[in-house]
Image (cartoon, helix red, strand yellow):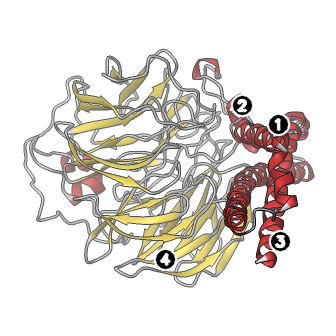
């Protein structure tokens, strides 16, 4: 019995001491972060200033990327230390309390047997109430310090009203993970040369949707394909003939349009058919249905949807997301590189849908008339909400992962009534849902920390999940030929065989994306990183085929079109490579302004949004 008492006493003292040590370290971590925050790195801005004077200095670019990586690692290390330290401190306290309770229980029993017997050390510990009070105070201070350290990012957030009026991107080198409006969707296994056929399960009609003021294109195949009756759903052929979601009709980054342009220059106007300044800033990529092209923009004053004539760039109409019940009185604080209008819109040819960082969800018909609107609740998001929208049959699907809770939501696209809601055991993410046809069923694939998860898009029921990611997840999943691809910076790149019993087929950690989503096509997998590397892998085996370092960051996602892969960096330069195992660079056209968006294609033309303007690109 004496040995047990001594052991319990030592455990209590050691655990309490360890908790106190962790508490001191948490307080020291907070003090250090106040004196020298890992994100507030003055070295990088100084190097960037030097780079502005010598833009061709490759050595200087390498230095910036190296310091950027150090700053990012310091940031994530600090977060890990705070989280792990807090857990260890609580565990030590619990062990110490249990040991003390055991000692008290034993002493009570010994006192009944032998009142004269006392445990001097224990009595001394209990008698010293100042030790308990001091320790409690230390723990409380440590918890407050940890909380303040963890929330220090809030000091670096800005209200959209304070951001650059033209939506300029600040130096992305020291920005944490975020996603600029990325969506993944797949209605079928995609083959680039597959014959486009109408889906026999959907309804098609010859009744055209007329838009007042919209010029008709007599010989436009896309306009003919876009005809759909108001109550009917679009066919597979109609979706593929248009560009209804971010990264194409199937959402995996595959465009079915041919004769896509490869040479342009926004500064001197080469092959620029038209360009138009978008009134309000936003990082949502454009979507297209027939002769209409849609984008969103927002600031502290209003959140807007803009509809332009695809052929001329003329503004056809605009609509405001205002007077929505539950909408916050003040806009949330967001970072300048996410903003209030990051999610890309979605359309089924009957209506268009937009989501903003305020949580406001808006549905409009093709003439701009409001069909319905609702607020999903202000997203607790320290960068700004950026998960994009996608439609499955008559359901609008929304990934709503915030700091408070993870949700997958479905609404009837015409009425706005909730169809189902699934709570997710996940952390906040900036990725978007991916719709894929695995051959036996439709699956909705989501990525977050730590899971890649699959859901039934009809019911919202979880089908499977695999824990394989970490950090703040921005990239959405990729998909092709029965495999799901997921990746995130400071995590890993994985290839997953989809099905009832999914398994990780391979993994790699050499090149990892921060924002850009994977593109899988022709048995190849493309990855673009925030430090300027574009890499190609064998999709089945996971072996690297080639990698190229271009310099500027990639926030946009690669798009496949007409045998080529298009990838635009933050400086507005697009790298076009052939979709082959060997690296073959086709061209490097420049937009003339910064961009974080992905190009969309229609009738031999490309459309690309910069930070200020929307461009139509094609041979004149």
Nearer-the-camera pick, 470 or 545? 470
Give the labeled residue for mark 2.
Answer: 156
* Element carrying mark 3: helix
Q: Is 316 placed left or right of 108 in the picture? A: left
* Element carrying mark 2: helix
* Element carrying mark 1: loop
Give the labeled residue for mark 4.
Answer: 496
**Chain-order first, disc 3 or disc 4:** 3
Label 2 neighbourhood size at 10 Å, few (<14), some (14-19), many (20+)? some
Disc 1 and disc 2 in contact, CB within 8 angstroms? yes
Residue at left offset 7%, top offset 49%: 205
Q: Is residue 7 above or below residue 530?
A: below
Residue at left offset 81%, top offset 65%: 117
Give the labeled residue for mark 3.
Answer: 6
* Residue 122 image offset from top left, x and y in percent: 82, 58
- Quarter placement of the N terminus: bottom right
Q: Is 444 placed left or right of 152 in the picture? A: left
Give the labeled residue for mark 1.
Answer: 40
**Chain-order first, disc 1 or disc 2:** 1
* Residue 580 image offset from top left, x and y in percent: 56, 75
């Amino acid at each position: 019995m004496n040995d047990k008492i001594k052991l319990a006493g030592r455990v209590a003292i050691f655990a309490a001491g360890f908790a106190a040590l962790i508490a001191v370290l948490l307080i020291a971590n907070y003090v250090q972060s106040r004196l020298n925050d890992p994100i507030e790195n003055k070295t990088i801005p100084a190097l960037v200033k030097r780079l502005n004077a010598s833009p061709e200095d490759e050595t200087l670019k390498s230095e910036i990327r190296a310091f950027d990586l150090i700053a990012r690692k310091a940031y994530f290390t600090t977060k890990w230390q705070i989280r792990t330290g807090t857990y260890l401190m609580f565990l030590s306290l619990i062990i110490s309390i249990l040991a003390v309770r055991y000692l008290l229980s034993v002493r009570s029993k010994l006192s009944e047997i032998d009142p004269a017997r006392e445990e001097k050390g224990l009595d001394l510990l209990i008698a010293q109430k100042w030790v308990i009070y001091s320790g409690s105070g230390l723990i409380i201070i440590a918890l407050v310090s940890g909380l303040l350290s963890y929330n220090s990012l809030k000091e670096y957030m800005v209200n959209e009203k304070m951001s650059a009026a033209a939506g300029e991107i600040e130096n992305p080198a020291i920005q944490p993970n975020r996603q600029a409006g990325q969506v993944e969707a797949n209605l079928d296994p995609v083959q680039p040369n597959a014959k486009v056929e109408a889906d026999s399960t959907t309804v098609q009609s010859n009744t055209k949707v007329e838009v007042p003021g919209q010029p008709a294109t007599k010989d436009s195949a896309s306009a003919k394909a876009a005809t759909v009756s108001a109550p009917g759903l679009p066919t597979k052929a109609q979706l593929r003939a248009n560009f209804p979601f971010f990264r194409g009709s199937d959402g995996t980054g595959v465009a079915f349009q041919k004769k896509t342009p490869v040479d342009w220059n926004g500064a001197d106007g080469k092959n620029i058919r038209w360009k138009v300044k978008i009134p309000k800033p936003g990082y949502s990529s454009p979507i297209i249905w027939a002769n209409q092209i849609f984008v969103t923009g927002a600031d502290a004053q209003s959140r807007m949807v803009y509809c332009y004539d695809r052929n001329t760039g003329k503004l056809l109409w605009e609509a405001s997301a205002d007077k929505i019940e539950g909408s916050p009185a003040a806009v949330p604080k967001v970072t300048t590189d996410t903003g209030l209008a990051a999610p890309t819109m979605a359309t089924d040819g009957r209506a268009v849908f937009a989501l903003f960082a305020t949580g406001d969800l808006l549905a409009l018909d093709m003439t701009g008339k409001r069909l319905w609107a609702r607020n999903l609740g202000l997203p607790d998001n320290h960068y700004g909400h950026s998960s994009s929208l996608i439609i499955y049959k008559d359901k609008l699907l929304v990934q709503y992962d915030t700091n408070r809770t993870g949700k997958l939501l479905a609404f009837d696209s015409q009425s706005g009534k909730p169809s189902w809601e699934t709570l997710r055991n996940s952390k906040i993410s900036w990725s978007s849902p991916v719709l894929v046809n695995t051959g036996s069923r439709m699956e909705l694939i989501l990525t977050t920390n730590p899971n890649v998860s699959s859901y039934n898009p009809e019911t919202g029921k979880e089908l499977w999940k695999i824990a394989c990611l970490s950090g703040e997840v921005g990239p959405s999943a990729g998909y092709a030929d029965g495999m799901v691809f997921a990746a995130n910076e400071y995590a890993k790149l994985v290839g997953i065989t989809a099905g009832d019993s999914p398994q990780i087929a391979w993994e790699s950690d050499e090149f990892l994306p921060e924002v850009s989503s994977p593109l899988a096509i022709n048995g190849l997998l493309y990855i673009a990183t925030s430090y300027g590397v574009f890499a190609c892998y064998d999709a089945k085996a996971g072996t690297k085929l080639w990698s190229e370092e271009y310099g500027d960051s990639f926030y946009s996602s690669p798009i496949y079109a007409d045998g080529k892969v298009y990838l635009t960096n933050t400086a507005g330069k697009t790298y076009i490579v052939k979709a082959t195992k060997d690296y073959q660079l086709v061209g490097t056209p420049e937009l003339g302004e910064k961009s974080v968006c992905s190009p969309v294609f229609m009738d031999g033309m490309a459309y690309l949004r910069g930070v200020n303007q929307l461009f139509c690109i094609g041979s004149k």
